[in-house]
Image: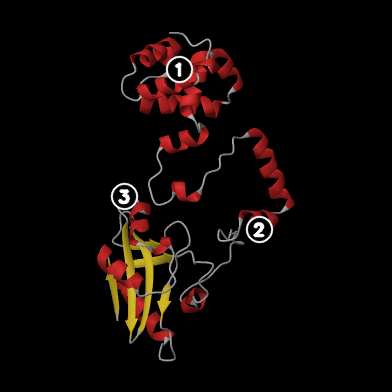
Amino acid sequence: MIEVIKDKKHWNDTLAQIEHIDFYHTYDYHQLSKNDGELPILIRYTDGSTILALPLLLRPIENTTYNDAISVYGYAGILAVNMDEHFHKEKFHKELQACLNAYNIVSVFSRLHPYIDYQESLLDGLGTTTTLGKVVYIDLQESLETQRKMYSSRIKTYINTSRKTCTVIESKREDLANRRLEASDFNKLVSSDPVRDLLSWMNDANTCRERWDAARWQALNGICETEYHFSPEQDGELTAAELLCQRQGVWEGVWQRYIESCHHYPFLPY
């Protein structure tokens, strides 16, 4: 039996029955990937305990009553569970073709997943499978040291060159996991001690601008605009000094830091 699933609940219920999936197969990723006029569908085939699921984007062909179907950007392809000796591929092909005809689908393109072995054999006989190239993968479960040992000499050269020309920022994974990352998060990675940077800039703005790279200066501006409610670039250090002396809100913390280490900032104007 074949059914075409369009709602999130039944889509998720189907994926929950399959052991190995990727985010490319999910309902939400299809919703994010679709263009205007495209409809995410999950073609589900059931035969006994066997379940097959093929996610696609249905696209109308302009000025016709026909459609074509494609996979999302990435690696999706067909999913399967419980393909035992009772499964008949020819029966699945026949029902799938009838489904495609019912929806006036004249062509289907699906990019297969490189680590799901059965996909090509399941679809063999329905069309043509073409190998376009090799897939590069990184096993993030390996330690960073082990990953770097596997880099080719060319990649190592590129990375070393980038380290000389770019700012490389490192952070603990747990500090960034399981939450939405905002611009302020990245600013704080660049400026690890924004109060120190703020006081240093107020003390000697010209020297700081000469010594800091663009990323650090932009980070300080971003932090000041969101947390201290002024712009170093537009308002200048005298405005910052006035706010410091007023000691209102978050500036009380900056003032306490200044009092504790004022000898580091002998030229700070106030």
Judge from the rendering whether residue 217 lies leftward or rightward of residue 72; answer left or right. Answer: right
Q: Estimate the spatial distance between the alpha carbons at disc 1 and disc 3, rounded to whole Å.
A: 41 Å
- Crowding around mark 1 (Cα neighbors within 10 Å: few <14, some 14 to 19, many 20+) is few
- The three-letter code of the residue at mark 3 reads Asp
Q: In the image, which disc is placed on residue 255? A: none
Q: In the image, what residue occupies the spot 38% across and 25% down?
A: 253
Q: In the image, which disc is placed on residue 146? A: 2
- Residue under label 1: 233
C-beta proximity under 8 Å, tags 2 and 3? no
- The three-letter code of the residue at mark 2 reads Thr
Judge from the rendering whether residue 41 lies leftward or rightward of residue 112; answer left or right. Answer: left
Kind of element beneath mark 1: helix
Instruction: Indicate the quadrant where residue 51 lies.
Output: bottom left
> Is residue 69 or residue 71 the one in the foreground?
71
Kind of element beneath mark 2: helix
- Residue under label 3: 36
Judge from the rendering whether residue 164 lies leftward or rightward of residue 241; answer left or right. Answer: right
The answer to whether 219 is drawn above or below residue 107 in the figure is: above
Kind of element beneath mark 3: loop
Instruction: Indicate the quadrant where residue 185 lies.
Output: top left
